[in-house]
Image (cartoon, grey):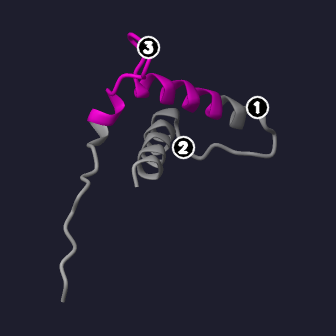
Amino acid sequence: MDLIPITHLKISKDKWLNKKIKYEEELKVEDILDEMCQKSYDWILSKGDLDIICDYDTFKDDFINLCYDQYLK
């Protein structure tokens, strides 16, 4: 059995959320995700044929986890 070395470690979620956006002085990844999450939640609420099945905090946690898992595969 041949072992494959690990050459890349996944950054922690907290560290990723606090990472600054390039060319911005105070903007972080978390700020962008918060805005995206709020706009997504508001859009779902505005649709008559879609139902929210969780509160905003749960939606936000799931949204951030989804972005983290998909962006940092």
Residue at x-position 39% and y-position 10%: 25
* Amino acid carrying mark 2 in the image: Cys
Considering every residue shown, the one lying at the far top of the view is 25
Q: Work out whether residue 63 or residue 44 is closer to the camera in this orientation and state it.
A: 63
- Residue 27, image x, y percentages: 42, 16
Q: Earlier in the sequence, mark 3 or mark 1?
A: 3
The N terminus lies in quadrant: bottom left
The part of the chain drawn in magenta is 15-41
- Residue 59, image x, y percentages: 51, 40
Residue at x-position 36% and y-position 22%: 20
Which residue position is annotated with label 2? 54
Query: Is residue 36 on the magenta stretch?
Result: yes
Considering every residue shown, the one lying at the far right of the view is 48
- Residue 71, image x, y percentages: 46, 47
Residue at x-position 55% and y-position 24%: 35
Q: For numbered disc 2, what is the local secondary structure?
A: loop
Q: Work out whether residue 15 or residue 60 is closer to the camera in this orientation and state it.
A: 15
Above-or-below relation of 60 to 26: below
Which residue position is annotated with label 3? 24
Which residue position is annotated with label 1? 46
Above-or-below relation of 64 to 36: below
Cα gap from disc 3 to disc 1, whole angstroms: 32 Å
The 10 Å Cα crowd at callout 1, few under 14, some 14 to 19, many 20 or more, is few
* Amino acid carrying mark 3 in the image: Glu
